[in-house]
Image (spheres, rainbow, N blue to C red):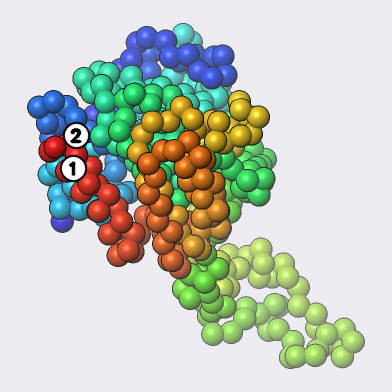
Amino acid sequence: MSFFATPQSLHFPEVLPLQSGASLRDYHLAYETYGTLNADRSNAVLVCHALNASHHVAGVYAGQDKSEGWWDNMIGPGKPVDTDRFFVIGVNNLGSCFGSTGPMHNHPDTGEVYGADFPVVTVEDWVNAQARLLDRLGITQLAAVLGGSLGGMQALSWTLQYPERMRHAVVVASAPNLTAENIAFNEVARRAIVTDPDFHGGHFYRHGVIPKRGLRIARMIGHITYLSDDVMNEKFGRSLRAPTLPAARGSLPPEGAGPARGGPAPDLRDYLYSTQDIEFQIESYLRYQGDKFSDYFDANTYLLITRALDYFDPARAHGGNLTRALARATAKFLLVSFTTDWRFSPQRSREIVKALLDNRRRVSYAEIDAPHGHDAFLLDDARYMGVMRSYFDSIAKELQA
């Protein structure tokens, strides 16, 4: 059962240097907390979010329907990350569109909306900002940092940037960097946005428009990569929304008809570009996801966050050697992957496991045979939930020792 969550915000007037050489000041970080911080402040768990999520990790907002946190099945009283035992913190990343300072906010020097002028941010920048928020909350060491997908990259980066400030890293459905194929998917999605006539070079706010067409396509591309082929076939197959194909100029010709048989040739314009062009159930589903996404997500935020995904590569500074890159990590690790996740495949998690074992670090690894693709990390697979519950139970026992 869900509990009520309360969004909070902290203002940071000081300058935050960024990896790019730019900086931010007078910024806000939106966050939420669940549970109670214990007397010695040792039971805090930081949850890092993925691309289109936020600080609203668990619980519901009072008086709002359908306001459940994005990982509410994982976090809460009696759940795998039990808020009766842990003080859980969700932080919205800089550059987001859910409360923390981002492209939709005003530049403190000019008073104008940042838009395309918002500086590039990286996973490392987010971790530094999160560390500052923890300083303000009086938390010097975390029991664990937990994240899935892009959130898992942040958890991994925490072990390298602040190894002394955490005891456990839980990295779910993630990778040490993106493959070329993943970067390619992100680039196609970005091009859909920046070529939308309503994008206006990222300053669409000034024109009172939103590049919704580009956002819809970007979301559709992304959503395809989050699901497995098996799940798509099971949910949608080749099902049509109507029992027959749409008619071209009144009716499709019978099989074998056409110019060679003297019959009329169907004109694709009649149904591919009309308001009745959605034929297959999978098309309807993707259109729905795209429409919904374009109503709440910011286009510049999408560009920023996918770039942060592309840039993350802790091994780059070590000649591509992940073992050397992770030598700095001292935390204990749990890594979880899913067999049908082709965007962040189990092989990528195993790369991290091997690099940690090469450094003689304590590592637990679970590879869950689940059919749901990348989205499996958000779902209620009993084996997955059991692994998470068991690991956090062991962390709770450490706290009591």
User: Is residue 96 or residue 176 the one in the foreground?
Assistant: 176
Instruction: Tell me if residue 266 can be seen.
Output: yes
Specify the quadrant of the image occupied by residue 140.
Answer: top left
Q: Where is residue 212 shown, x and y percent of the image?
A: 54, 45
Mark 2 and 1 residues: CB-CB less than 8 Å, in contact?
Answer: yes
User: Is residue 320 or residue 188 the one in the foreground?
Assistant: 320
Q: Where is residue 62 shown, x and y percent of the image?
A: 16, 44
For residue 237, above or below residue 229: below
- CA neighbours of label 1 inside 10 A, class few (<14), some (14 to 19), many (20+): some
Question: Left or right: 368 with respect to 263?
Answer: left
Q: Quadrant of the C terminus?
A: top left
Disc with the residue nearer the chain's start (2 vs 1): 2
Specify the quadrant of the image occupied by residue 43.
Answer: top left
- Discs 2/1, front: 1
Label 2, label 1: how far apart the Cα atoms are: 8 Å
User: Is residue 309 or residue 26 the one in the foreground?
Assistant: 309
Report the amino acid beneath label 2. Answer: Asn
Residue picked out by circle 2:
43
Q: Quadrant of the N terminus?
A: bottom left
Instruction: Tell me if residue 98 can be seen.
Output: no
Please report the residue visible at 80 percent of the width from the left and 80 percent of the height from the top.
265
Secondary structure, mark 1, is: helix
Question: Left or right: 35 with respect to 242?
Answer: left
Residue picked out by circle 1:
396
Q: Where is residue 244 shown, x and y percent of the image?
A: 59, 84
Report the amino acid beneath label 1. Answer: Ala
Secondary structure, mark 2, is: loop
User: Is residue 74 or residue 119 the one in the foreground?
Assistant: 74
Q: Where is residue 161 shown, x and y percent of the image?
A: 43, 24
Please report the residue visible at 51 percent of the width from the left and 28 percent of the height from the top.
122
- CA neighbours of label 2 inside 10 A, class few (<14), some (14 to 19), many (20+): many
